[in-house]
Image (cartoon, rainbow, N blue to C red):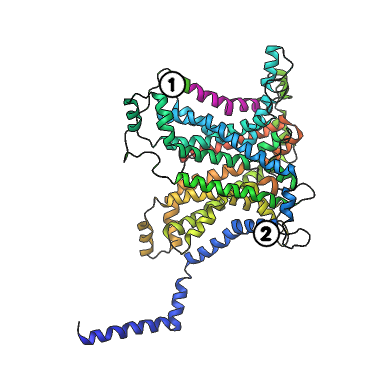
Amino acid sequence: MSSSAADAAPKTAAAARAAAAAPEGVLLRRLRYAEPATLLWIVLIGVLVVLVVWPVAELLLTSLRSARTGTFTLSNYTAAYGRMRYVDALLNSLALGAVSAAICAVLAVPMAWAASRTDMPGRGFAWLTVLAAFIIPPYLGAIGWILLAGPNSGWINQAWMWLTGSEHSIVNVYSFWGLAFVIALNAYPFVFIFAKSGLDLISSEMEDAANILGAGTWLTTMRITLPLVGPAILAGVILVFLEAIALFGTPAIIGIPARINVVTTQLWQFFEAPVRAEVAAAYAMPLLLITALLILVQRLLLGRKGYVSQTGKGGERRPIPLGPLRWVMFGWCVLVFLLSVAAPMVALVQASFAKAWGRGFSFDNLTLGNYTYLLFEHDAAWSAVVNTFVFAAASATFAVVVALAIAYIVKRRVMPFGSLLAFLCMAPFVIPGIVMAIGFYAAYAGPPLLLYGTSAMMILAFTTRFLPIAYANGAAGMQMIHPEMEEAVRILGGGRITAIRRVVAPLLKKALLGGWLLVFILATRELSAAIFLVGPETRTISVLLYDLSEEGNFEVLSALGGILLVITLAFVGIGMKLIGRDFMLRRE
């Protein structure tokens, strides 16, 4: 390089810095950050503040604020845990979660092992059983088991007394163990999915080595196979535990008549007149902390990528021949199907077509009057149906749109702090629905917004509740699209918004549809959040079902549950047709 050129280089750099420092250069740099992607980032932050940050912050502030003076106080915590009854409710929830999770493990792990590792016939039937149990709303399963195992009048007890001549019932669903069993019959699919996903990753090499050394099938399974997937099973058990302690419908329908007080039903009592939202907020904080801690433990367990095998890549996976025992395992799957799906659903169907469900099957007891009453005479039934599907459709649409935009910004690293958006988007996963509902009540029920009991409150709460599901689908889909396709759009003059609209969204249509359907289906059955936020004009099917259960009108309740289940199955069928038969159970 010549001396003149060397002298010119510093001058050129200095001139560039001077130009950038000039007002025009500053303006250009600012305009660069005003592109649509930046504005979208700002809007999304605002949306997540409304959906997540402010309700959680207001929940914490309400728990520390005096209802009378508005000053800082710990008296709410004293009121929340100053009575032994309230402490017992927390202890009952923890015990109920532990027992329900243990029952789930007993039900699901043998099914998962048989479906994944053995030559059991009907492995597809095991998946069908899990899907059916997953679809049935927990409170409908609870009603079915009240019809089956209610003291004296339940089918099982009536059959027992008829066969034995005894005057005493053999089972009672209105008990701690009955409540735990009914919860487990709805929640075991979580353990099945985690266990089977882990079992599907194990090669047969280590099992073959154990067999060569003289270990039989059962010893190998207990000493080799199940310990390898122990972290995955434990992660599923933790999820069931969290589901059980945060559940409202089943504990309310079975636990309240049985005088079993748990955290969620105690929170509901705090919302009876006079409403003590500040005490409810304080009482909910331990539930939130327990959930966050156990979710962290679950993530750490699932983050152990090397727990499945230490034998290197891949490996052949051969089904284990069970001989005649394969029919025993199939019989176990059939038994779980009967307990979790067939028996309660048959009881519900019978009750929905019965004049009096306790009279059993007989032609003179059959009627269509329950459905006629709901469809043409009941004051709130049609509005509840319309509200349910309007709220669910709006929530699913809003959640999918927000999740897609956030997934794009995070996966494409469009803006700094994109991981913050992802964190806020997934935060509702660690917040129980009932706790989130109390946060929304604290944040938006009072002035200036006064949203309590409105459609807007219900839609915002449902959107927040299921936003993590929509984001998981959108983020998984984004990883499958190469950025070069979007870059081609930008080279041709299109912006990022155009790339999302013309390229990303069409390529992700199956993932987005799957996320939309899953959020829609879950929103139609949501009770934990709805029961705290519903108003006279915004009742949903789940809330109406709960109201009917309190009235003891099991015939009309069963008919309404049947309507909800038929519509849900229709949407599940659409999802299976368009996306795949396991779209509701897919783990991205």
Q: Which residue in the structure is indicated by mark 2?
A: 61
Q: Which residues are magenta?
A: 330-349
In the structure shown, which secondary structural element does the residue marked by tag 2 occupy?
helix
Which amino acid, mark 2?
Leu
Cα distance between the residues tagged 1 and 2: 57 Å
Q: Is residue 347 magenta?
A: yes
Give the quarter of the figure containing the N terminus.
bottom left
Location of residue 47 with respect to 142 vertically, above or below: below
Principal secondary structure, stretch drawn in magenta: helix
In the structure shown, which secondary structural element does the residue marked by tag 1 occupy?
helix
The nearer-to-camera label among 1 and 2 is: 2
Q: Is residue 422 magenta?
A: no
Q: Which residue in the structure is indicated by mark 1?
A: 326
- Residue 523, given in percent of the width and then of the height, sits at 60, 44
Give the quarter of the figure containing the C terminus.
top left
Q: Residues within 10 Å of mark 2 (few under 14, many from 20)?
A: some
Image-based side of 219 in relation to 251, left or right: left
